[in-house]
Image (spheres, rainbow, N blue to C red):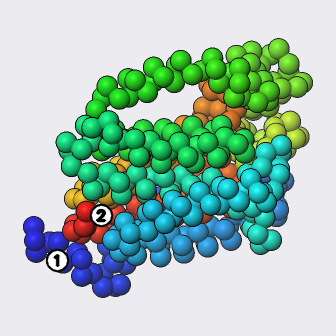
């Protein structure tokens, strides 16, 4: 055991590249390739304006991912709290100087790119929670006073994200945080109390916290046919496109709902619908299977990690990315209200893609350094 630890802590750059999870990289490239082809179709058979930019972003993102993966996991342990603080400062900056788009203030315009700090904050929260619980003894986790600080680590960014407003991202931060709590060994009664408190808060949130458009989304989800040309338009057109794809699809570039511009936001939130219309049920299942393999791979890495930080980090990130997929696909199928969550590596967007690839870089770093002996900090 000691010998194994020594070997893995002294890996050279060449050895790290050899131990890089190239199978995971290929899976990510396969999903991204589907995204490129779908964005090409969304552009009417043209590489501009979406596919070309997405390809460039992917090249930059993969480069960042590999660099992150090769960095010693000890550095990510040390940088967890600084990354969290930087994320909070960026969220505050959004409120001060943020760019307003589609009725929400979520971006910082840097000229070259519009940065969405809430996407990066999802990763920073998981890093901070993984570091906190890494240093905890089993008896500490059972103490309520010990759990107050990590709860605050979740609630601070959630409050700032809710101000933007962005309910979907807030919920994803909370759910990923709950997953880290669960794997860390928090007492089960705590989850029961939390869900009971959530149920009690829902009526208050409806009356005092939710914006009118968020309430309308919930009402539309319950009965989209009540306003087919207004608030129910998006989801009804999405269902029509999904159904019209049938088993085998209409064929590449032959999606009528998307190319006749009935399908809204076809390059971002509703890109899965475009893909399924052209490639049918089989194409949709293929894409979901690729996502499933990604999550199983990430879960396997978390299971194999010998230190708590890597195990919690890899598992938390895996849950976060799976929530992206679950929420987006459920949303376009009308199973949950529309919340504006992108489909990872497929939807058009710079910060979301960068966040996903950096997250998988951290997961691969956990794999490369899975036997490292980390200090309790």
Residues at badges 2 and 1 in contact (C-beta under 8 Å)?
Answer: no
Q: In the picture shown, does residue 52 fall above or below 240?
A: below
Q: Residue at x 24, y 59 (%)?
A: 307
Residue 75 visible, this orientation: yes
Q: Which mark is residue 210?
A: none
Residue 333: name its quadrant. top right
Residue 113: name its quadrant. bottom right
Q: Where is the N terminus found, in terms of image quarters?
A: bottom left
Q: Position of residue 27 (x, y in %)?
A: 47, 58
How many neighbours does mark 2 have within 10 angstroms: few (below 14), some (14-19), or many (20 or more)?
Answer: few
- The CA span between labels 2 and 1 is 20 Å
Q: Using residue 375 as the reference point, say whether residue 132 is left or right of it.
A: right
Q: Residue at x 61, y 42 (%)?
A: 159
- The residue tagged 2 is 377
Q: Position of residue 369 (x, y in %)?
A: 29, 69
Q: Which mark is residue 6?
A: 1
Q: Where is the C terminus found, in terms of image quarters?
A: bottom left
Numbered disc 1: secondary structure: helix
Q: How many marks?
A: 2
How many neighbours does mark 1 have within 10 angstroms: few (below 14), some (14-19), or many (20 or more)?
Answer: few
Q: Position of residue 347 (x, y in %)?
A: 68, 51
Sequence-first tag of 2 and 1: 1
């Amino acid at each position: 055991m000691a010998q194994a630890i020594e070997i893995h802590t002294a890996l050279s750059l060449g050895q790290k590249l050899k131990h890089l999870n190239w199978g995971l990289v290929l899976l990510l490239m396969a999903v991204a390739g589907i995204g490129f082809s779908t964005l090409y179709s969304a552009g009417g058979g043209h590489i501009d304006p979406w596919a070309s930019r997405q390809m460039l972003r992917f090249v930059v993102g993969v480069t960042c991912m590999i660099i992150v993966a090769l960095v010693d996991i000890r550095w990510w342990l040390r940088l967890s709290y600084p990354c969290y603080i930087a994320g909070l400062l960026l969220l505050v900056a959004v409120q001060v100087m943020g760019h307003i788009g589609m009725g929400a203030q979520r971006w910082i315009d840097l000229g070259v790119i519009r940065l969405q700090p809430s996407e990066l904050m999802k990763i920073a929260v998981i890093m901070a929670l993984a570091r906190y619980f890494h240093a905890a003894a089993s008896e500490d986790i059972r103490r309520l006073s010990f759990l107050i600080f990590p709860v605050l680590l979740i609630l601070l960014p959630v409050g700032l994200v809710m101000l933007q407003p962005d309910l979907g991202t807030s919920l994803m931060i909370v759910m990923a945080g709950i997953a880290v709590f669960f794997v860390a060994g928090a007492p089960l009664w705590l989850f029961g109390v939390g869900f009971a408190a959530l149920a009690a808060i829902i009526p208050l949130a409806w009356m005092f916290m939710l914006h009118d458009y968020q309430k309308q989304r919930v009402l539309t989800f319950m009965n989209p046919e009540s306003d087919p040309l207004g608030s129910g338009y998006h989801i009804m057109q999405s269902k029509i496109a999904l159904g019209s794809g049938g088993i085998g699809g209409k064929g590449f570039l032959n999606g009528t709902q998307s190319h006749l511009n009935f399908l809204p936001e076809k390059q971002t939130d509703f890109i899965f619908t475009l893909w399924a219309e052209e490639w049918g049920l089989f194409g949709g299942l293929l894409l979901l299977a690729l996502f499933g393999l990604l999550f199983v791979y990430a879960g396997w890495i978390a299971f194999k990690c010998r230190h708590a930080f890597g195990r919690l980090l890899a598992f938390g990130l895996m849950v976060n990315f799976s929530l992206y997929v679950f929420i987006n696909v459920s949303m376009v199928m009308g199973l949950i209200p529309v919340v504006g969550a992108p489909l990872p590596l497929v939807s058009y967007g710079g910060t979301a893609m960068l966040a996903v690839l950096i997250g998988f870089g951290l997961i691969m770093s956990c794999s490369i350094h899975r036997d490292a002996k980390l200090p309790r900090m």
